[in-house]
Amino acid sequence: MRVRKLQIILIVWLLCLNLVLGLYSAVEKRQADEISTSQLDRILDLYRDNGITFQKKPSRRIVSWRALQLGPADLDGLVRDFLGDLPYEQTFIYESRAQYVSDDRTITVDWSQHSISYQDLSIAPSGSARVSGSSIPQGSLTPQETMMLEEIGRRFAARWLGENVFLQSSVPRGNYLDMTFCQMDEGRIYYFNRIRLSVSQKGIGTASMVIWDVTGRGEKLDTMPADEMLYAQLSDILAEGQEDGTKITDTVTGIYDGYEIEEQTDQKATAVPDQTLVLSSGKTVRLSYLGK
């Protein structure tokens, strides 16, 4: 009986020891996956001292990053999905291009450049130089009109890039709005999949896009931790500064992780992670997690 009691005590003691070691290991791993509160607070204080606040406190989590391997997307399939049941004529141009014509719409696919160009002749006549905006006054659109055109552009971009898109830039030119959208996947911006378009109240006049397919992931990358990224981005913001020499006052309204192409051949590419700060002034600051 006494031996049995000792066995039970020993088993309980071993279970408790394993539990304590497990908890210690979990805490240690969590600390390794996060920067400390004091580290983050020091960075936020630096931003605050230079007139920049955060709408939402950044995450302390350290993300493990891998490169994305990219390959050709099914561009012809995207065009056919966009046209749906509309009748069209397809013409092949040389070896790497094909053209689809449906009423006033002309869509050209260039497989060698992973690109698609779109033009609606009823909105943007052939030969129009409007896209460059060189001779068109800026600022003719009201805020309400700008919001409406951005929504039209967003819906068009979503038909090619998927439901989630990120508005990278928006520039008014006369009665038109020129915008650039990028694909988003699980909250991360795929800068390598983007569409530039021109829209008026009549609709989308012209658009050009580059689209890749994600085919796999590479090895784990040696990347900068969150506090070092924020510190480097603060340096970029301060380097630009205010043109009139006054102190910067701005707010970081969004922090987005994403991917941009680093290496590219004809049919393959490698995309590496970067981080984008979006400020209330309209500025954006991007930095590669590789420190480039």
Image (cartoon, helix red, strand yellow):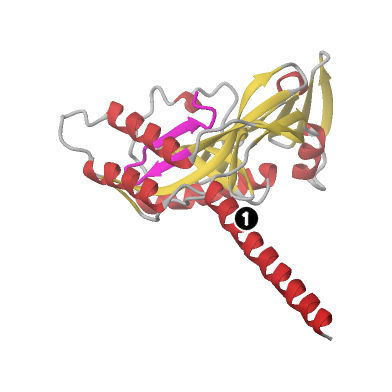
- Residue 262 seen: yes
Which of the pair 284/149 is nearer the observer?
284
Q: Is residue 117 above or below residue 79?
A: above
Q: Is residue 289 magenta?
A: yes
Left or right of 90 in this view: 110: left
Q: Is residue 59 magenta?
A: no
Q: Which residues are magenta?
A: 276-292
Left or right of 265 in this view: 27: left
User: Is disc 1 placed on a helix, strand or loop?
Assistant: helix
Hey, what amino acid is under mark 1? Answer: Ser
Give neighbour class at mark 1: few <14, some 14-19, many 20+ (Cα, 10 Å).
few
Q: Is residue 123 above or below residue 97?
A: below
Say which quarter of the image contains residue 192: top right
- Residue 211 seen: no
Q: How far across and down, in percent of the image, does residue 155 sit?
A: 60, 50
Which of the pair 170/43 is nearer the observer?
43
Q: Quadrant of the N terminus?
A: bottom right
Which of the pair 240/135 is nearer the observer?
240
Residue drawn at (82%, 41%), measured in percent from left and top?
A: 87
Q: How far across and down, in percent of the image, does residue 21 sit?
A: 64, 60
